[in-house]
Image (cartoon, grey):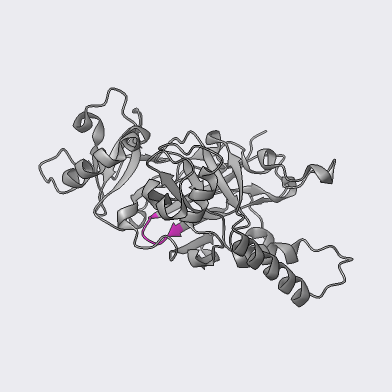
Amino acid sequence: MKPAAASVPFTGPFALGTLSASDGVPFPALVTPDGRALDLRAVLGERQPTTRALLEDWAGTLPRLHALAGDDTAAWQPLEGLRVHAPIEPRQIFQSGANYRQHVIDLEVAHRSPDDPRSVEEARAEIAAVMDRRAAEDLPYVFIGLPSAITGPYDDVVLPGWAEQPDWELELAAVIGRTAHRVSVEEALEHVAGYAIANDLTDRAGVFRRDMKAIGTDWLRSKNAPGFTPLGPWIVPAGSVADPGDLRVTLKLNGETMQDEFTKDMLFGVARLVSYISQTARLLPGDLVLTGSPAGNGIHWGRLLCDGDVMEASITGLGTQRTRCAGESE
């Protein structure tokens, strides 16, 4: 799908994207809110330039990008007519689960056993207490996703024939711009280059193993089908995002608002997640940290994704992505 004009605006003087002509090779680009694009291959002189390569030396690259954004003599071209790809190909994707307080409460109630003696109010109160304890003890829940699940912000999403309950999960993604290993919460945001929109699709029927409950969750099966993570359209530099802990996250399904929450409902903000992950793993430039999804998923509404559905996703200052669901061909 080509981007609609309304999907271009974002906060700040520029953002990063990956673009191509209809039949060309993708290239890293500087994009402005008024719909102009600058091919960064020639400008930066990289042999094999990618958006991820720009992040390898983010401290050195960022001032050059600011200068280019204000250069009206550069070889700007209209964004219209160019294909917008996922803005980056990450090496690693770290995904936070159960990170929005209201979302977890809703899921707990939705998955209650018919034999559960608790009232809805009692169930909500108990899980709320669990959430508060997790936040106090600083125990985020993080698992790993596959880069092959990434797709563009306007590409169709193919729903596999085996996916019984495909669902949406709109999330704020933090993009790492500096290697982070065992960093403190206070240092963590210094390692974030920018932010992007991610929709972390999930087959609810595949989350828990049916053959042996003790095995637990099966994130490979439920979240990592090709195209299950639409990303972008842009990476907006962190300096242009005033407060990642106070952004509005909105997803519409066929024009109807399903998710509409602020990131301040997160139990663990970006800094705490990056710090927590870095205590075990080494975060690399271009890696993604998905921060979890707010309330309003399909399982809550009793309305899951099907062929022909159109999702429109936006986060304050980061643009808008629009993806259409397509059933898998026989």
Which of the two residues, 40 or 330, is positioned nearer the viewer here?
Answer: 40
Residue closest to the far left = 73
Which of the two residues, 56 or 15, is positioned nearer the viewer here?
Answer: 56
Residue depicted at x 38% and y 55% = 318
Q: Is residue 21 visible?
A: no
Placement of 113 over or under 28, stated as above or below: below
Placement of 6 over or under 205, stated as above or below: below
Q: Is residue 82 visible?
A: yes
Residue depicted at x 30% and y 56% = 240
Where is residue 262? Give x, y as percent.
Answer: 49, 67
**In which quadrant will I find the C terminus?**
top right
**In which quadrant will I find the N terminus?**
top left
Q: Is residue 315 magenta?
A: yes
Q: Is residue 72 magenta?
A: no
Quarter assignment of residue 149 = top right
Which of the two residues, 231 or 277, is positioned nearer the viewer here?
Answer: 277
Residue depicted at x 74% and y 48% = 205
Where is residue 108? Give x, y as percent.
Answer: 73, 63
Where is residue 12? Give x, y as percent.
Answer: 27, 56
Where is residue 251? Give x, y as percent.
Answer: 51, 60
Question: Which residues, given as a range, are shown in magenta?
Answer: 314-319
Query: In the drawing, does residue 268 fall left or right of residue 19?
Result: right
Residue closest to the far right = 115
Prevailing secondary structure of the magenta residues: loop
How many marks are shown on the rendered structure?
0
Query: In the drawing, does residue 169 fall left or right of residue 82?
Result: right
Which of the two residues, 111 or 214, is positioned nearer the viewer here?
Answer: 214
